[in-house]
């Protein structure tokens, strides 16, 4: 605005040319609003006391939380991989370790550029469209389902090695129900409990490895030679190919650290990835080699592919070690079931808050304040999957592989999108493009091997995935469907026999449409860029159900708003008549505290605030803004 122009008074309507249309099609004229945040606002104290700003997790507790997940996978991966690859299983495991090494840099680049909880969903939400991010999130949900079922089933299978009359099916369903009950009453993961379980698990694994090593020294490694010469040993390339796919399950849990990165202290995330990689690189090859030196391959394929480590413990150390390994397996795998509940509740809540899933999932019970609809729904889905697949852990693990490997591939795509569309974001490390492509290729090979061996597993995966995708699709298309039905009813109103009933239906649909479109959005703009502001409106029209968008600009006290800012907003408000474009000038610095205060004053949550990709000069990180989404570059 030029210096000669008069400042518009607070709340003045911007002029707009309107035309005839349905009541919900034209929300009205935009406004100009001024806010002063230079004086301390009550919400500043609320922000300072916010629980999300409590003590952050250090390296050890963070490693324990995600380490329980990834190190517990050796309890079922060793048997499955050995059954597929035979004596070449250690080579397949080494290939997986090399693949995981590539993904260390891939994850560090993405999660230090966007240090926000959500993993794959978060990176795709900030680099692509909301629809693609939601589709990837459906895969994450299915991954949590498979994690819960596989972990519960394997925990009970290990328990059955020391309890011969154990009803495996009933106990598995009971274990899933037990952890659902714990979540319903508000008991979830804690860093202290995770550290205790992790310490017990690692100690047991070390004891098993040492005992097995001493047994091999005393009795020799003749078993592996006999297995190599037996008919049970598959050909080399076939063994490596299918063994690699099975061994990829051994790195499931590597993505767990990205799900709670906001709760970790600065610099801890990269260390947790390093620690998890080191644990897998030491534990899986050693246990795999020792198991093949102790247990015949034919026995592994026929009897012990689910409980190989318990059998190795029994042969090398006796019944006492077998019981110790079985109890440790039951404990740590049960912990993985709890992890799946906590993870799926957090992810589903995020999707529901972003209007990707029905808001009914956000309902909380009055007694404990937990999301009972999510927890009970997750229990029913897990139980149905276990029943449909008849408790076959080998098949369940492959369904898990499909979802987990699919997530890793989409994460690579997110990394590539981050390099091209959000290159200004600072990050601790940049993975070379060749390493991203190579990692994606290796994971694709693992996914192919899983599908080729048992193609019908893909059908099971698709059934559950499409069901989840349909829920998301309903949320994205509900507004369009309501509008289409509304127009059909209006144009067919003359043919209706009961006019009053039709009018009531139209009124009800109008109310529903207006309710869906009534939730406003904010776009935080640093300066005047009509192209960026236009792209923001186009993004909102394509991805969000709303008719209200506010362009917010923070300016220092005494500083003038960007020249022609109001004219630009007025122009955009006129050319997009079906969305009300407001202009909000905030007097105050652009800080996380003021963004929080703005959210409280306007009643708009921060996850409904957008911004362009910040420049390297911006002192605030995207994560510090509390969920503000980057949508343009």
Image (cartoon, rainbow, N blue to C red):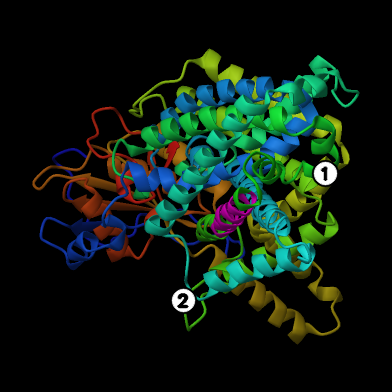
- Residue 524 is tagged as none
Q: Residues within 10 Å of mark 2 (few under 14, many from 20)?
A: few
Q: Position of residue 254 (x, y in %)?
A: 53, 38
Q: Examine the image and state in which quarter residue 426 appears.
A: top left
> In the rendering, at what x and y percent does residue 77 appear?
68, 38
* Left/right of residue 300 with respect to residue 175 in the rendered view: right
Q: Earlier in the sequence, mark 2 or mark 1?
A: 1
Image quadrant in which the N terminus is located: top left
> Could you tell me which residue is drawn at 52 percent across and 45 percent down?
204
Image position, residue 605 (x, y; %): 38, 60
Q: Is residue 607 above or below residue 212?
A: below
List x then y, in percent, for residue 503: 71, 80
Q: Is residue 407 magenta?
A: no
Is residue 538 visible to the viewer in this orientation of the structure?
no
Which numbered disc, 2 or 1, marks the residue closer to the eye?
Answer: 1
- What residue range appears in magenta? 322-338
Image side of residue 469 versus residue 324, left or right: right
Q: Is residue 526 visible?
A: yes
The answer to whether residue 326 is magenta is: yes
Q: Residue at x 36, y 25 (%)?
A: 424
Instruction: Report which quarter residue 560 is drawn in.
Output: top left
Name the foreground residue: 536 vs 494.
536
**Above-or-below relation of 499 to 506:** below
For label 2, the SS is loop
CA separation, marks 2 and 1?
45 Å
Query: Dot 1, how many residues are within 10 Å of its Cα: few (below 14), some (14-19), or many (20+)?
Result: few
State how many labels appear.
2
* Disc sitting over residue 303 in the figure: 1
Classify the position of the C terminus by image quarter. top left
Instruction: From the viewer's side, name the closer residue of 192 and 37.
Output: 192
Q: Which mark is residue 369?
A: 2
């Amino acid at each position: 605005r030029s210096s000669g122009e008069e400042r518009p008074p607070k709340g003045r309507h911007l002029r707009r040319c309107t035309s005839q249309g349905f009541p919900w099609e034209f929300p009205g004229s935009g406004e100009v609003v001024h806010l002063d945040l230079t004086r301390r606002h009550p919400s500043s104290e609320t922000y300072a006391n916010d629980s999300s700003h409590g003590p952050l997790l250090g390296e050890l507790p963070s490693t324990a939380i995600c380490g329980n997940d990834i190190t517990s996978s050796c309890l079922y991966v060793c048997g499955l991989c050995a059954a597929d690859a035979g004596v070449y299983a250690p080579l397949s495991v080494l290939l997986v370790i090399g693949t995981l090494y590539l993904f260390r840099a891939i994850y560090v680049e993405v999660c230090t550029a966007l240090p926000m909880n959500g993993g794959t969903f978060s990176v795709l939400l900030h680099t692509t469209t909301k629809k693609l991010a939601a589709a990837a999130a459906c895969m994450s949900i299915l991954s949590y389902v498979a994690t819960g079922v596989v972990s519960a089933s394997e925990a009970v299978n290990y328990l059955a090695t020391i309890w011969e009359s154990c009803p495996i099916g009933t106990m598995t369903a009971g274990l899933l129900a037990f952890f659902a009950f714990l979540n319903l009453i508000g008991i979830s993961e804690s860093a202290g409990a995770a550290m205790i379980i992790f310490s017990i698990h690692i100690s047991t694994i070390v004891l098993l490895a040492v005992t097995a090593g001493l047994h091999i020294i005393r009795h020799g490694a003749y078993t592996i030679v006999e297995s190599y010469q037996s008919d049970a040993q598959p050909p080399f390339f076939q063994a490596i190919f299918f063994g690699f796919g099975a061994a990829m399950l051994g790195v499931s849990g590597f993505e767990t650290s990205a799900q709670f990165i906001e709760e970790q202290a600065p610099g801890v995330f990269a260390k947790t990835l390093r620690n998890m990689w080191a644990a897998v690189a030491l534990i899986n090859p050693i246990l795999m080699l020792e198991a093949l030196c102790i247990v015949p391959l034919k026995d592994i394929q026929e009897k012990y592919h689910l409980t190989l480590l318990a059998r190795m413990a029994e042969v090398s150390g006796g019944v006492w070690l077998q019981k110790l390994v079985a109890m440790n397996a039951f404990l740590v795998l049960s912990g993985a079931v709890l992890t799946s509940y906590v993870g799926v509740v957090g992810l589903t809540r995020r999707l529901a808050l972003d209007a990707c899933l029905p808001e009914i999932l956000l309902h909380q019970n009055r007694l404990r304040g937990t999301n009972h609809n999510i927890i009970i729904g997750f229990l029913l889905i897990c139980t149905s999957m276990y029943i449909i697949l008849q408790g076959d852990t080998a098949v369940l693990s492959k369904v898990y592989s499909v979802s987990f490997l699919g997530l890793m591939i989409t994460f690579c795509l997110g990394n590539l999108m981050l390099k091209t569309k959000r290159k200004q974001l600072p990050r601790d490390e940049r993975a070379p493009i060749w390493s991203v492509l190579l990692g994606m290729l290796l994971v694709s090979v693992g996914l192919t091997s899983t599908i080729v061996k048992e193609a019908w597993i893909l059908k099971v995966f698709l059934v559950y995935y499409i069901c989840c995708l349909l829920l998301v699709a309903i949320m994205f298309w509900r507004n369009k469907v309501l509008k289409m039905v509304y127009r059909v009813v209006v144009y067919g109103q003359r043919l209706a026999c009961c006019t009053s009933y039709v009018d009531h239906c139209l009124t009800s649909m109008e109310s529903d449409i207006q309710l869906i479109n009534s939730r406003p959005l904010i776009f935080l703009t640093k300066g005047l860029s009509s192209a960026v502001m236009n792209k923001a409106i186009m993004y909102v029209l394509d991805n969000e159900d709303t008719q209200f968008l506010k362009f917010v600009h923070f300016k220092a006290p005494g500083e003038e708003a960007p020249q022609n800012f109001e004219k630009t907003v007025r122009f955009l408000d006129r050319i997009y008549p079906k969305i009300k474009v407001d202009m909000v000038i905030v007097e105050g610095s652009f800080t996380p505290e003021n963004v929080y205060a703005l959210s409280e004053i306007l009643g708009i949550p921060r996850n409904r605030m957008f911004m362009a990709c910040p420049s390297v000069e911006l002192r605030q990180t995207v994560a510090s803004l509390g969920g503000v989404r980057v949508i343009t570059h």
